[in-house]
Amino acid sequence: MMIPRMPCLVLALACAATPVPAAFAAPPPAQAASLQDQVEQVLATAPAGTRFGLLVAAADGREIVAINPDARFIPASNTKLFTTIAAYALLPGIDAPDAQGGAAVALEAGGDVALYGHGDARLSSAPDCAEDCLATLADAVAARTRKVRDVIGDDRWFPDERWSSGMSWNNQVTESGTGISALSLDDNALELVVQGAAGGQTPQATLPYYRLRNEAVTLEGGTRALAFDRAPNGDELRLAGAIPAGASWRYRVGIDDPAHYAASRLRALLEARGVKVHGTVRVRHRPATPLDDPRQRGTRPVPVAPEPVFLARLSPPALAADVMRINKDSQNLHAELLLRRIGRLSGSGSVVDGLAALRGVLAQAGVPRAGYDFFDGSGMSTYNRASPRATVLLLRWAAGQPWGAAWRATLPVGGVDGTLKNRFAATPLQGAIFAKTGSLNASNALSGFLRAASGQELIFSIYANDVPDGVSALPALDRAVQLIAAQN
């Protein structure tokens, strides 16, 4: 009996329908990791325990990468972004000479000479000073009289709030945490210079204004291990530790009472001009009261100190130039004075008046109130908080303002200048990232603008908190930023 032959087509279909054993099946094509996944993998290389927040957006607001974008982080010196944007938004004539902020002198009853501060951060007593010079005011006094009684430093233009809430006490003795005053001079810092002598001998050490107790020693060989401390509002600084023979060390020391220091420098300049000073150096402060807080002041008058007719008054350069220094160099004192200048617009120049004005700008920019809390203008306060989303929203808003380009030019440029001079050098982001850095107590931050590989501009904010002691999150942070730029 013959078996009928099946058509080939039928046989082919039957064979195709036969299941192929799993062991011989082709693997599915591998899917490339998303940019979000890649960024998370890079950040995972940071020291264990580090907590990151990140938001990257296109100029039109489209989100590209988001990691904990609404979580709140210690922003460190990224706080200066908020302060300087508020200054550009609120201060009139920010690009004109600062006529309001200049220091002034007056001859007062009884023969006293008083030096008045108005919040200028750049007053200088340096021998080579060319503008905004204390010597100019000393010349004016010397031209009018050859003798005075007391020399008074008056900083009542702002209430006496020399340190913000939440600043670590150990920073007070350093330049980073120097006292804040309406009468500030020489960045409210002095240089301590230590020079090693012969082995076993006390090194040479010099420091103006303060009394110096030198307990350091010189060693033959070894490494430098010096430290100093000073009691709050004390005038004696204690130097301890060791320095190798022939080695030198310089460090900037903070000043607790800037108004007193400024008055003492004016006395020295007057005496150098032949003016006889018969009295002492003293200060006039205005203690802060509940009326310096707009929430408690209500409709009651803003407290201000009276001022006389001045003998002479300085006109410092435009505040816009100072914003450049604040952001490029991350200058804390100048940022704090800028916040108080903002607070003086409709208040007394208190910190809380400045912060109230800042909150008004953030509301105008559409930044959610839950995205931030600030207690100072520089970022030295560990109480400050900001989210990546709040930061990006503010940056995007600022970029669209008439003054946006001028403000953005104050930011450090990767591999080129400011606090980014040594970062992103010899990478595609050299000259293509414009951002504010931040570093404080286990915290790092970087927020600003970058030009991606495609040429499009991105706005970004990245925060790293809870970084373990002795290690750094910066390598992972910078690699993540470079990855984002390369893939956009």
Image (cartoon, grey):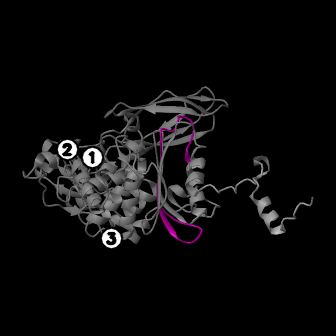
**Percent of width and height locating residue 150:** 20, 45
Neighbours of disc 2 within 10 Å: few (<14), some (14-19), many (20+): some
Q: Which residues are magenta?
A: 447-475
CA separation in Å, label 1 and label 2: 8 Å
Q: Residue at x 33, y 33 (%)?
A: 232
Compared with 310, 70 (above or below) is above
Which corner quadrant of the image does residue 107 belong to? bottom left
Residue 165 within the magenta-colored segment of the rendering: no
**Element class at badge 3:** loop
Of labels 3 and 1, the one closer to you: 3
Indicate the amino acid at tag 2: His
Judge the density around disc 1: few (<14), some (14-19), many (≥20) Cα neighbours within 10 Å. many
Element on which disc 1 rests: helix
Disc 2 target residue: 285
Measure the alpha-carbon separation of dots 3 and 1.
27 Å
At which x and y percent is residue 231? 35, 30
